Image: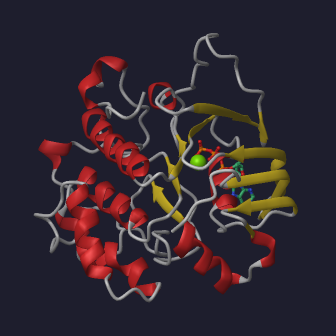
């Protein structure tokens, strides 16, 4: 898939999203302007409820804005119907969520092959095998999600997100359900694989240290993007507030998006990969050996 390196991969103009729940409408995103360059790695930080996940959903074509323009990989998303959006995701976007969202009744290789099969590619299983090998899981092809550790499940999710060769990878707190060491391993794969593929990466994280691995950091608060801090002014503190469970996401296996029913991971093996309950802030820097940080992530 070719990428035009002179054109932003993501271009948001005066984007607004209002979501209406039982308690009434909430202005979740309020006038967001944002460009991402092809291949750029960008972290998104900000307090709980700032609108980070909603921003990711809009860029992935899983949530519709009420105003503004969303252009991703040269496509004006407002011009696409649901089928068009599914095709758009299949062609351009891979998504990795905190809770993995693998299909529990499918093996690792079936999970990874699914979006490529949906795209009609004849080489779905061959490519799935390659992607799983690239994240070190060629010995787990036939395992179901319930037979994989949390870190392994997230590596499967990364392989699935990349199987169609997207030029944009969206990751929403991908280490949020993992212990620190496993999280580092997963982040290493995420950065290495996206850079190998020259895919841009938008990484939502509550971990200041992970944010600094990216080319730049976007801070969100109250539905807006705050001005970027000047280089050398020191990294902004990232709050360590607990993350609530993710909102159920629309979409299916069309692009590595989650199925309606999350994988759960009920019988994750505890000792080797002790999985947090997902509501704990991550550990401190001492728990993140520098050697675990991918060489390609500055
Ligand atoms: N369906 C909905 N109806 C009304 N408001 C909603 C709906 N879904 C989310 N919201 C509100 O939108 C706001 C932004 O939610 P979002 O999930 O984007 O935040 P976030 O920055 O990702 O937070 P966190 O760090 O906790 O994941 C929140 O205040 C939330 O309550
Ligand atoms: Mg969120």
> x, y (%) of residue 102?
36, 68
At x 48%, y 45%, the residue is 173
Q: Is residue 219 above or below residue 276?
A: above
> x, y (%) of residue 229?
70, 20
Q: Is residue 59 visible?
A: yes
At x 67%, y 82%, the residue is 84
Please give left or right for residue 136 compared with residue 165 in the image: left
Residue 236 location, quadrant: top right
Figure coloring? secondary structure
Q: Is residue 112 above or below residue 209?
A: below
The quarter of the picture where the C terminus appears is top left
At x 80%, y 77%, the residue is 79
At x 46%, y 77%, the residue is 253
> x, y (%) of residue 184?
31, 36
Residue 148 location, quadrant: bottom left
Please give left or right for residue 211 compared with residue 290 in the image: right
Q: Is residue 104 visible?
A: no
> x, y (%) of residue 156?
30, 62
Please give left or right for residue 107 compared with residue 217 in the image: left
Looking at the image, the residue that sits furthest to the top is: 233
Q: Is residue 269 above or below residue 42?
A: below
Q: Is residue 262 above or below residue 243?
A: below
């Amino acid at each position: 898939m070719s990428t035009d390196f002179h054109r932003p991969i993501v271009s948001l103009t005066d984007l607004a999203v209002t979501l209406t729940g039982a308690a009434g409408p909430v202005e979740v995103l309020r006038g967001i302007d944002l460009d991402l360059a092809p291949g750029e790695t960008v972290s998104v930080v900000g307090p709980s409820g700032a609108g980070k996940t909603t921003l990711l959903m809009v860029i992935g074509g899983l949530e519709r804005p009420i105003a503004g323009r969303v252009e991703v990989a040269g496509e004006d998303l407002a011009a696409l119907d649901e089928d068009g959006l599914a095709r758009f995701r299949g062609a351009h976007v891979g998504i990795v969520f905190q809770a993995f969202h693998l299909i529990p009744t499918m093996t690792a290789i079936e999970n990874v092959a699914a979006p490529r099969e949906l795209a009609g590619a004849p080489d779905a299983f061959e490519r799935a095998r390659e992607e799983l090998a690239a994240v070190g899981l060629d010995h787990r092809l036939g395992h179901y999600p319930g037979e994989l550790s949390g870190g392994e499940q997230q590596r499967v999710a990364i392989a699935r997100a990349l199987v169609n060769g997207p030029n944009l990878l969206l990751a929403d707190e991908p280490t949020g359900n993992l212990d620190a060491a496993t999280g580092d391993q997963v982040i290493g794969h995420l950065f290495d694989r996206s850079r190998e593929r020259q895919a841009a990466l938008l990484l939502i994280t509550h971990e200041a240290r992970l944010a600094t691995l990216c080319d730049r950091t976007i801070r969100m608060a109250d539905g807006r993007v705050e001005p970027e801090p000047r280089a050398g002014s020191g990294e902004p503190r990232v709050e360590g507030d607990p993350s609530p469970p993710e909102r159920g996401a629309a979409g299916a296996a069309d692009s590595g998006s989650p199925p309606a029913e999350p994988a759960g991971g009920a019988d994750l093996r505890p000792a080797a990969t002790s999985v947090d309950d997902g509501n704990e802030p991550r550990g401190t820097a001492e728990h993140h050996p520098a050697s675990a940080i991918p060489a390609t992530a500055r």
